[in-house]
Image (tube, helix red, strand yellow):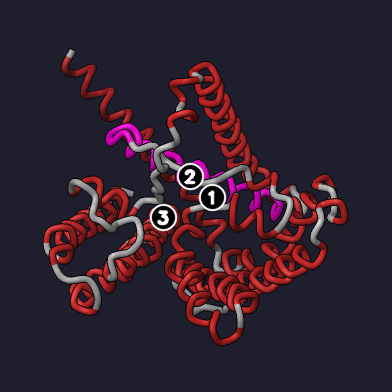
Amino acid sequence: MEEEIKNFIKVWILAITSLSYTYYISSKLPKGIIRLFSLLPIIYLFTILPLSLSSFHLSGLTAFFLVWLANFKLLLFAFDQGPLSPPPPNLFHFISISCLPIKIKQNPPPDLTSQENPPTHFVQKVFYLILFAVKLSLLVIIIRSYEYKKHMHPNAVLALYCLHMYLELEVSLVLVVTPARAIFGFELEPQFNEPYLATSLQDFWGRRWNLMVPSILRPTIYYPIRRTFTHLIGPKWATLMGLVASFVVSGLMHEAIFYYLTRVSPTWEVTCFFVLHGICTAVEVVVKKEVGTDKRRLHRAVSGPLVLSFVAVTGVWLLFPQLTRNGVDEKTIEEYSIVLDFVRDKFGILRQKAMHIW
C-alpha cells in the first residue's frame, strides 16, 4: 500500500508539472497545429501514467481524469475551445479544470440568485447533504455485505455490483471535486443528477449519468460530426450520426479504462455496450419525434423501471464479464480491507508517538 501511494504521488507530480508547462508555454503559442504539436507529448504522457498504478481505485480514477478528461480538454484547448479557453486566471484553476471532473456553473440571472431566497437555498443544501450521507451509508453496507457473498445468489451479487458501481462513482467524484469548491470557491455543476429517476435512455445518458462525460463529448465529437455532415445527409441524420459516434467514442474510452484496470487485451464487450446504447438512444430520439405529444408516451412510472432494467441487464451482459473473469471484483473488495488495515496501522503508529511525547 505504501509503495502504491508513493507511485500515485509521483504520477500526479508529473501530471501537475506537465499541466504547468501547458499553462505557461503551450497557452502562449498560436492555436491550431502548432499548439497541438506542443501538447502531443503531454497527451502521450497522460496515456501511459496510469500504467504505473496497480490499485483498482487509484488507477481507475487516474485513467479517467488524465487519459479521458485531461486529454480531451487539451485537444479542445489546442484549437482554443472547451473549458480551458480562454485560460483560467491562475495555474491552480487551470490544473483543477484540466484534470478534474469540474464544470463551473455559469452566473445565474440576478433574479434567480440564492441571496434572494436564502431559506430555499439552505434547505436544498441540507437535502443534498442528507441524500449524500444516505448514499455513502448504502455504499458502506454494500461493501460489508460482500463478506456474505458466498451465501448469495449470483444474480443478487450482480445487482449489488450495479448499485456499487453507481454509488462509488458518485461518492468518489463528489469527494474529489469538493476540495476545489472549498479552496477556489467554484460553484460546480453536479456530477450525477439522480440517474435512478431517468425516464428514457436520452435522459439517463445526457442529463443524469456522469455529466462530465457528455459535456466533454459534445464539443469534441457530437458537434463537429453534426456540423460536418449536416450539408451532406441533412440535419436529422447528421444529428443521429453525431449521437451514435459519441457513444462509440465513449465505448472506446471505457474500453481503455477497463484495460488499465485489468491489463488484459480488450474483448470489445464494453464498446458493444455503448454502441448498443447509442443505437437504442438514436431510435428513441426518432420515435419521440414521430410520436410528438406527451400523451402518447409511456408514463414515467413505466418508462423509468424499463430504462433502469435495460441499463442493468445490458451492463450485466456486456460490462461486468470483463471485470469478473479477470478477478477485478475480488481485487476491489480486497482493496477495502487493505486500505482499512493500512489506516489502522498508521493511526496506531501516530497514537503511539503521541503517547510517547506526552
* Residue kind at label 3, given as amino acid type: Leu
Q: Secondary structure at mark 3?
A: helix
Q: Is residue 262 magenta?
A: no
> Which mark is nearer the camera, 2 or 3?
3
* Residue kind at label 1, given as amino acid type: Ile
Q: Is residue 34 left or right of residue 125?
A: left
Residue 333's label in the rendered image is 1
Mark pair 1, 3: CA separation: 16 Å
- In the picture, the quarter occupied by the C terminus is top left
**Are there few (<14), some (14-19), or many (20+) residues within 10 Å of tag 2?**
some
User: Which residues are the magenta region?
Assistant: 157-185
Answer yes or no: is residue 337 visible: no
Q: Pinpoint residue 211: horizontal percent, then vertical percent.
A: 52, 52
Mark pair 1, 2: CA separation: 6 Å
Q: Residue furthest top?
A: 358
Above/below status of 9 relative to 43:
above
Which corner quadrant of the image does residue 58 belong to? Answer: bottom left
Residue placed most toward the observer, 347 or 157: 157
Q: Residue at x 18, y 49 (%)?
A: 91
| Main secondary structure found in the magenta portion | helix
Which corner quadrant of the image does residue 56 belong to? Answer: bottom left
Mark earlier in primary sequence (1, 3)? 3
**Residue denoted by label 2:** 336
